[in-house]
Amino acid sequence: MEFIYSLPLFSIVLSLFSGPLCMILPGKAARYYTAAFEGLLIGADCLVLARCVKAGEAITYTMGEFPAPWGNEIRFGILECLVALCFLVVLLCSVLAGWRFVVHDLDETKINLYYTLVNLLTAALLALVWTNDIFTGYVFLEILTLTSCGILIVREIGRTTLAAVRYMILNLLGSGLFLLGVVLLYDVTGHLLMVSMQEAIGILGDNQASMTVISLAVGILTIGLAIKSGLFPFHFWMPDTYGWATPTSASILSSLVSKAYIFLLIKIYYRVIGLDMLTRLPITKVLFVLGLCGMVFGSVSALRAGNINRMVAFSSAAQIGYIYMGIGIGGLAGYTAAVFHILTHAVTKSLLFLTTPRLAEVSGDTLLFKGLQGSGLRDRNAGLFFTVGSLSMVGIPIFAGFSSKLLFAGAAMEAGSPKKVIPVMLVLAVSSLLNAMYFIRTVIRIYTAGGREGEIRTRSPHRLDYNIPALVLTGANLFLGLFSWVVTDLIQRGLLIFG
Amino acid sequence: MIETLLINYEEAAAIILFGIGFTMLLFHRNLIKKLIGMNIMDTGVFLFLASMGYIEGRKPPIITDGVMDTSAYINPVPAGLVLTGIVVSVSVTAVMLSLTIRLFKRYHTLNLDDIYILSRHAEEDR
């Protein structure tokens, strides 16, 4: 086995060790260490991705060299490495750009603990993307839940604690359902490795009683993950959670944590159930309908939101709806669109959540729309970044959001049945219109002169450690928009060898 | 239907426990009782796993009398899963209890609705 194939395992294990290491480092050193370490992980992931693209196949890494039905496995192909790369880049940008806010929001003695949590969260994210064992998936799912709760409560105001409790309760319900689903599947198939499970399910396909249990198990498991990722009607915890966390946390929670759950779901569909078997189960229809509802109701809630962070958070609910709609459409095109939107939303939403606190900063620390008037003129960089994010969410050409919407429409057309095409087109149009209403309204407001003109300056207007990560995210956004074919080609090749 | 449930009474009990725990975690307003519900829910899953892994008349997979035949022993994997699950459940409970303590110190109540109202009064939207 070549050394390069061990890199994913090393990435996960080293992230796990980095957590405790940050505990003994002082705050500033922990931050530098975390940033440097994320950089290393990105490099390692790029190497693995390049190798996978060159080899054109997925690589299964058996831990301890125990063969298939017994050992634990990591499996990485083009798709996994691409998603991991996107996650790591967004993570690094969030850590760098949110630094000043972390110092401001946190107790000085707890800064290193924050980076401990970020490192553990990285390990959980990577493990969820790469694992080939469903129970390992469950364990890292819980680690992800605990660490994401941790990065939420480090900002010690009453609101975050309450938000964290509600977030945890919903997540625990989701975890419980996921565990029950996994246990049921294990009972029917007798395996925990995803590939072995699929073989067993293929044999059981003709048995009516087993199919009932499998259908039930997949339903329970899907609902569990849907609750955790905030699909309508389980999205009501989002505004409090994202709205009150420190910006780095908000960015990580909204753009990475919920996506990791969805990616695990796609992986289970592809690798455990298999797409052929999945069409026989009713659950994807449910996801399709809930996704469509989420797209509309998330946007309606965003339209009525009172402050800018709540608006962006509710917009996340709508975007999660898009992704589930893609899964509901199904087929290669549907899943390609869903994965592409995972990437789009990750780079866009993190940019928005990292920008809003800067706009608030030059407006007397208010997030209310009224106070934000003219903030884009007071902090031109932040205004520009917010505009880029908004335009991408609305779906203006050359930005990533436009490519996503095009892919969703194309996937619906390819699916062919009018029962899918008409609702998708209709809801896409309505949702885009609603998106435009609240995002463009906000952009106009932050560029309207007035408000606290000249009164408050940002604490440090031209900090490179904020501007460079934000520029990277903007660049990623434009890349996904202008060169979407490069990425969709990679995603499609990845999906073909994903199962 | 009833007959199948009676034969598989362990699984039926496990699912009922899961349901009780799930509804408690979802609907109860008292935070401590929510946590108790969560633990009942997890226990339900563990019971389900343990009962599925046990086969009547077989022994735990520890070789003492030289019998190497696998059909003499039960499957050890479910027990391993239960152990992992217990560890996860304990750590989640610990985190939730610490959060509950923090909320109680701040708001002096365990009722989630009251805490919500109090937090709205305490800190108006920025």
Image (cartoon, coloured by chain):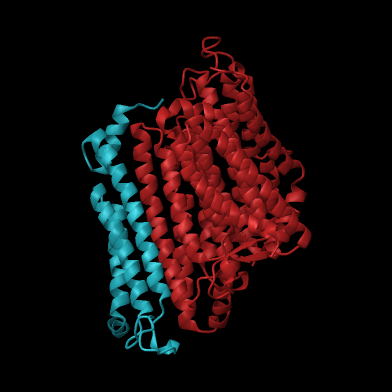
Chain colours: A red, B cyan
Q: Position of residue A38 (x, y in %)?
A: 60, 42
Q: Quadrant of residue B99?
A: top left
Residue depicted at x 27% and y 52%: B34
Residue depicted at x 53% and y 66%: A133
Residue depicted at x 64% and y 66%: A60
Is residue A121 visible in the rendered structure shown here? no
- Give the answer, above or below, for where B96 lies relative to A463: below
The answer to whether B75 appears left or right of A272 in the picture is: left
- Give the answer, above or below, for where B124 lies relative to B25: above
**For the view shown, which residue lies furthest in the top direction?**
A454
Frontmost residue, A189 versus B122: A189
The answer to whether A380 appears left or right of A141 in the picture is: right
Q: Position of residue A136 (x, y in %)?
A: 49, 62
Residue depicted at x 58% and y 33%: A96
Label tally: 0
Q: Quadrant of residue A51?
A: bottom right
Is residue A269 visible in the rendered structure shown here? yes
Q: Position of residue A273 (x, y in %)?
A: 56, 70
Q: Quadrant of the C terminus of chain B?
A: top left
Frontmost residue, A318 versus A185: A185
Frontmost residue, B70 versus A345: B70
Q: Quadrant of residue A399?
A: top right
Q: Quadrant of the N terminus of chain B?
A: bottom left
Q: Position of residue A440 (x, y in %)?
A: 60, 30
**For the view shown, which residue lies furthest in the left direction?**
B108
- Give the answer, above or below, for where A449 lies relative to A408: above
The answer to whether A1 appears left or right of A449 in the picture is: right
- Give the answer, above or below, for where A198 lies relative to A18: below
